[in-house]
Structures are given as C-alpha cells and as structure tokens.
Image (cartoon, rainbow, N blue to C red):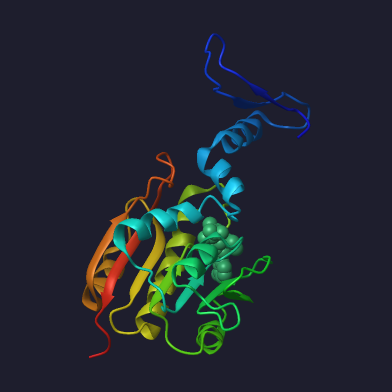
Amino acid sequence: MAGVKKEGKPGSGARALKTRVKKKRGLKNSSRRWLERHLNDPYVQRATQEGMRSRAAYKLTEIDDKHHILAPGMKVIDLGAAPGGWCQVAAARVKSDPQNPSVVGIDYLEMDPVLGAAILKTDFLDDDAPDRLIDVLGGPPDVVLSDMAAPTTGHRRTDHLRTMHLCEAAADFAVNVLRPGGHFLAKTFQGGAGTDLLAMLKRNFRSVHHVKPPASRGESVELYLLAKGFRGEG
Ligand SMILES: C[S@@+](CC[C@H](N)C(=O)[O-])C[C@H]1O[C@@H](n2cnc3c(N)ncnc32)[C@H](O)[C@@H]1O
C-alpha cells in the first residue's frame, strides 16, 4: 500500500514488525493513527489470514466459545450483518446447508454473498422486515444476533441513543419470534441496557448478562447483552 512501510523495533532481534503510515498531505493525523492501529491490530491480521470478512467475527467466536449459543442444526437470524463476519461464523457453527441456509442476515448495506447464509438487503426497522426474515428462514429462529450499530455522528450521546434503539428493536423482535430455549445476543453500550429492557429480558429468559469479549477493544464503550434460554410464551 502506498505510504505504508514496515518497521522492526530498533535494537530488537525479534521480528516485531509494525506498519507505519507515512505523513502525507490530505490524511489527517487522526485518520493516520486510525489506519496505523487498524493495520497493526492482530485481529485484523487474523481476519485477513483466515478469510473472515470482519474483525468483529472474533467477537462472536469468543462469545460462543465461552457461552455456547450456536450448535449444529440451529436456525439463526443476524441483524446488521454487513460485511458478513458474524454470518460466516454462524453458518460454520450451525453447519448451515448452502442449498437451504439456516442463517439469514439483514443489512441495508450491500454485502457480498456468504456461503450458508441468505442475505436480505433491507432496513431492519422497515415494517415488513420481521416477517420477511422469518419467511426466508422458513420458521422461527433458535438464535437472534444483533451487531447493529447506527452510523456515528460524532455526537456521543446521539450515537448511544440510536444504537440503544436498535438494541431494543432487536430484543422486541427476539421475544416475538424465538423458539423456546433460544438465545439473544445484541450490541449495547457501557452503562448497559436500560432498566426497562433488562427487566423485559429477565422476564423472558432464564439468564441475562453483559459480556465483553477480548476482541472488543478495551477502550471501546461497546458491550454485548446476552440473554439465554427463552422461556417462550405463557
Ligand atoms: C458493526 S457492523 C456489523 C458487523 C458484522 N457483525 C460483521 O461481523 O461483519 C453494524 C452493521 O449494522 C448495520 N445496521 C445499522 N442499522 C441497521 C438497520 N436499521 N437495519 C439493518 N442494518 C443496520 C450497519 O449497516 C452495519 O453494517
């Protein structure tokens, strides 16, 4: 990549290569720092090596390794799926049949196809999105995932409120469509889910807690809400 060079640590015999982005006109310092951090991020490097669409894929991998929410044969809905990392992980773990996918992802952004997942290019907040998701999946899901995040405005409180709204919409959807025993995992923010949302989830699931996988950057306010064991209606 132009303007990018690899440097070893001076004096270290070890191959501690670090990618530096040259100072160039037109690239703000903050953008250069972001690019440098991105290029040196071990999860980004691992995603490139392993053919994963996103570093976010490892957040779901780590959460599932610890909390066991995905298993072969399950049906999964992935809200806010682009560019497709979570769909890749879910399709592999539920052993989705590419001819008859048991994973359906939705995003209003364009994304490349993912083997074993059906993709809807739609806004999840559209009135008909929930019915369309169930239609394409061919029945109720065992797991509803949401990594939806609103585009950032730079105004922290606005961003927070918008993403919390998406989390609430996802939770509402989950309790309306999940199979009994099913699980719900959604992105939220530090400070956690609002008390009404938590109370609603606690009524509907056997366990509810916040999780922060190692792949979620320590300095990020992102947190995940995991609700396990949907009690079902009544
Ligand atoms: C952090 S990214 C998801 C990354 C994904 N989990 C992966 O591993 O590739 C968040 C996504 O949520 C999507 N999103 C936000 N609001 C949405 C909405 N109302 N309907 C559908 N997708 C939405 C964004 O377009 C964005 O692609």
Residue 150 in sight here: no
The picture quadrant where one finds residue 211 is bottom left
What residue lies at 38% left-to-right and 85% top-to-bottom? 176
Q: In which quarter of the image is the C terminus?
A: bottom left
Examine the rendered structure and indicate whether residue 65 appears above or below residue 208. Answer: above
Q: Report x, y in % for residue 10.
A: 57, 11
Between 59 and 189, the residue placed more toward the observer is 59
What residue lies at 76% left-to-right and 26% top-to-bottom? 24
Q: Quadrant of the N terminus?
A: top right
What residue lies at 66% left-to-right and 69% top-to-bottom? 113
Relative side of 234 to 116, left or right: left
What is the count of numbered marks? Answer: 0
Residue 212 in sight here: yes
Relative side of 64 to 6, left or right: left
Relative side of 199 to 53, left or right: left
Q: Report x, y in % for residue 84.
A: 58, 63
What residue lies at 66% left-to-right and 66% top-to-bottom? 109
Q: Where ligand 1 lies, by image quadrant?
A: bottom right
Q: Report x, y in % for residue 146.
A: 46, 66
Examine the rendered structure and indicate whether residue 119 appears above or below residue 22. Answer: below
Between 187 and 105, the residue placed more toward the observer is 105
Q: Determine the residue located farthest toward the top in the rendered image.
A: 11
